């Protein structure tokens, strides 16, 4: 297995005249930054420019990571991204089950790491994600209890009733 080079200088790929991955990533970031500057008009928000370039670099690095991973790891990573963006995030403002769903999203990365390292996931490897899942529930419930006003102001639905927890015996 060939390990990609991380030099910023031009390095043809074993006789090809293709641009190396780091140079290609830098070109993607540069064109993203250029697009931001061109779209900014007369006043450039430099913090926005930096965030755009950093975000573009992270997306490019993520895509390269998926290219390097086995199919199981790539599938886990892609499905977790879709689950987070299109299931968990919308649920935060729709239904109280959002915390339970979000705990799944938080547990999957440990499976992803195992899949990258070994190319498989067995029943024994489910212990760490299960522990992470069950740890996240009380953690986020405590967070929701402490920050319930902020959650309500943001339009987020808590996973439990604050009134029940606040009831004094």
Image: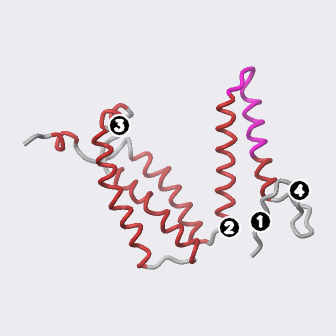
Q: Earlier in the sequence, mark 1 or mark 3?
A: 1
Q: Earlier in the sequence, mark 2 or mark 3?
A: 2
Please tell me which residue is depicted at 48% across the width and 50% down the height of the picture. Answer: 86
State the separation of the CA atoms marked 2 and 3: 38 Å
Residues drawn in magenta: 29-45
Task: Report helix, strand or loop for mark 3.
Answer: helix
User: Viewer-nearest of labels 2 and 4?
Assistant: 4
Residue 115 in percent (x, y) is at 54, 72
Please tell me which residue is depicted at 69% across the width and 48% down the height of the picture. Answer: 57
State the separation of the CA atoms marked 1 and 4: 13 Å
- What residue sits right under mark 1 in the picture? 4
**Disc on res. 124:** none
Q: Earlier in the sequence, mark 3 or mark 4?
A: 4
Residue 125 in percent (x, y) is at 44, 75
- What residue sits right under mark 4 in the picture? 10
User: Viewer-nearest of labels 1 and 2?
Assistant: 1
């Amino acid at each position: 297995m060939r390990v990609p080079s991380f030099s910023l200088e031009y390095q043809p790929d074993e006789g090809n005249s293709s641009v190396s991955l780091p140079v290609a990533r830098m070109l993607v970031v540069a064109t993203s930054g250029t697009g931001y500057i061109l779209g900014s008009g007369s006043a450039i928000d430099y913090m926005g420019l930096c965030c755009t370039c950093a975000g573009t670099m992270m997306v490019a690095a993520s895509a390269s990571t998926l290219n390097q991973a086995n199919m199981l790891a790539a599938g886990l990573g892609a499905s977790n991204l879709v689950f987070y963006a299109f299931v968990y995030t919308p649920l935060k403002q729709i239904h109280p089950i959002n915390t339970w769903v979000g705990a799944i999203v938080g547990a999957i990365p440990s499976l992803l790491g195992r899949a990258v390292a070994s190319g498989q996931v067995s029943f024994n490897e489910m212990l760490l994600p299960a522990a992470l899942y069950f740890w996240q529930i009380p953690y986020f419930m405590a967070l929701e209890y402490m920050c319930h006003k902020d959650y309500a102001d943001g339009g987020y639905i808590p996973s439990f009733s604050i009134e029940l927890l606040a009831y004094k015996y």
